[in-house]
Image: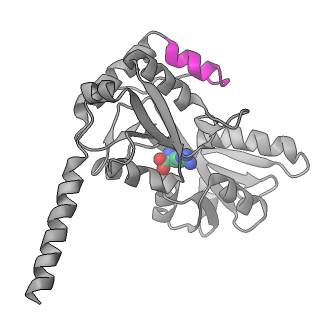
Amino acid sequence: MKKVFSLILVSLLVLSLTACSSSALTVSSVRKKGSIHMATSPDFPPFDYIGENNEVAGIEIDIWNIICEKLGVTLQIDQMSFDALLPSVQAGKIDVAVCGITASEERKKNTLFSMPFCLAAQSIVVPSGSEITCKADLEGKSVSVQSGTTAESFCTGEGYNVGSYESNTDAQLAMAAGKVDAWVIDDLTAMDMVATYNADHPDAPLVILSDVMTTEPYAFAFKLGGDDFVNEIDKILTELIEDGTMAEIFANYGLTYIAPEL
Ligand code: ARG
């Protein structure tokens, strides 16, 4: 028994040592390493998606290419499902997670966020002809959302009958197939995905309601403790907002950039 107990103690000690050993990011550690290891879930156009050459593309990729250029390091991009991103950054497996991540108070407890670079809201999407025409009509109805998202926690909190799907494409298809009454998703991605869907399905288009829910600041996610590096990222982001680069990036995707009030 004693042996088992000390074995447990030793493994706990080793575990906590390894947890501490992945040290927090600093500007000099990143420069020394020469690269930034990013991960995204590229199912979130126009922020992150798979582009023409089968490469990850989007607004956030453009922003990070510029950040890396300014820092003089290269960008390594991994793909993972949305709900794996924050645990990976928290465990120090990646340097930064990006993909329209809302910097919520809940997430701030175990994630360090950059300054917000964009404000989003949740949109309600329904098949055309649906009897749901505003948020109040959602009462008692079923909605699809992407699992692990703020749409999921918001809709659960509102008491809707929530169906969670691994990707937004699955959540969209579930609604289009009539498995749920509505689909709740961030506004700019809703516009992008609905436009693509409607171009392919002109006879059964989807409609984005004018009622939006929540206001959510998007920011980049880091492991707690990386303040030295994140302060530098905030400086660069402020520069990109002030010199018009951010507006240019958004304009390349047909969007008008509105800087979040800081
Ligand atoms: N803004 C929402 C959130 O942080 C949704 C983000 C979904 N991103 C994605 N790549 N699918 O929960």
Residue 132 in the figure: left or right of residue 66 = right
Q: Residue placed farthest to the left in the image?
A: 2
- Give the x, y percent position of residue 180: 69, 66
Residue 74: image quadrant is top left
Instruction: Return the x and y of residue 22 as percentages of the image width and height.
Output: 25, 46
- Residue 205 in the image: x percent, y percent? 83, 48
Magenta stretch contains residue 248: yes
Span highlighted in magenta in the image: 244-255
Q: Does the magenta stretch include residue 243?
A: no
Instruction: Residue at 22% x, 41% y: name it.
Output: 225
Residue 196 in the image, given as x and y percentages of width and height? 77, 41
The outermost residue toward the bottom is: 1
> Quick check: can you spot residue 219?
no
Report whether 132 appears left or right of 1. Answer: right
62 versus 126 height, above or below: above
Instruction: Please count the marks in the image.
Output: 0
Asked where in the image residue 71 lies, by quadrant, the reply is top left
Task: Look at the image and tell me in which quarter the N terminus lies.
Answer: bottom left
Residue sitting at 59 percent across and 60 percent down?
Answer: 166
Q: Which residue lies furthest to the right in this view?
A: 203
* Quadrant position of the C terminus in the picture: top left
From this viewpoint, is residue 77 visible? yes
Q: In this view, does 219 lie to the left or right of 251?
A: left
Q: Between 134 and 51, which is closer to the camera in this rendering?
A: 51
